[in-house]
Amino acid sequence: MNKIVVTTLESKFRCYDMRTQHPVDGFAFTSEVAHRSTVWTVAHLPQNRDVFMTGGGNGGFNIYRYRYPKSRVAKHLQDGKPVGVAGSVDLLNSRVVSTQPVVGFDWSPDREGLCCMCSLDQTM
């Protein structure tokens, strides 16, 4: 719970844990290289928010699972205030489905794992 995934132009995404914010360091996050090109889209599985998919400029998609750390809060070494502890992400599957970027993606709200995606080669 309380996760935000942000995609970047540098083939990466960041997964922020929004539970604890430190006044100087901000929110805890983990960064991961997802594709060898811009990461265009990200979507969490509605039935399990720990699973999410990224769509890349290489025409591929990756499915990840977020793993929570043993403790999500620790004490900051310098000021002793609470600071968040980021979890880790595990790559579950990766496929290239198009020659063009995957720019749209949506999970089915009714069927777990069923999805629809589109790319710039005009396929769905």
Image (spheres, grey):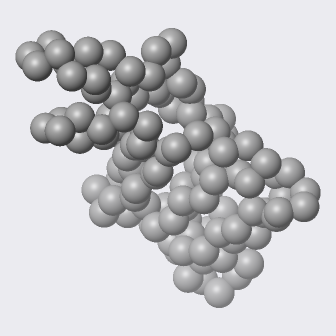
Classify the position of the C terminus by image quarter.
bottom right
- Horizontal side, residue 78 vs residue 66: left or right: left
The answer to whether residue 32 is seen in the rendering is no
Asked if residue 77 is positioned above or below residue 6 in the image, the reply reads: above
Q: Is residue 85 above or below residue 3?
A: above
User: Residue 3 appears at what percent x and percent y?
Assistant: 50, 45
Q: Which residue is found at the position 66% from the left and 76% from the top?
A: 118
**110 relative to 96 in the view: left or right:** right
Q: Is residue 52 visible?
A: yes
Work out whether 16 lies above or below 111. above
Viewer-side residue, 83 vs 100: 83
Q: For the point 30% across and 38% down, which residue is it?
A: 21
Pinpoint residue 94: horizontal percent, then vertical percent: 62, 45
**Picture quarter with the N terminus:** top right
Side (left or right) of 50 relative to 33 = right
Q: Residue 17 location in percent, x, y?
A: 43, 38
Q: Position of residue 33 (x, y in %)?
A: 38, 43
Total numbered labels placed on residues in the image: 0
Q: What is the residue that sits farthest to the bottom in this orientation?
A: 122
Residue at position x 40%, y 56% in the image: 6
Q: Nearer the viewer, residue 34 or 47?
A: 47
Task: Give me the residue at 23% from left, 34% from top.
Answer: 22
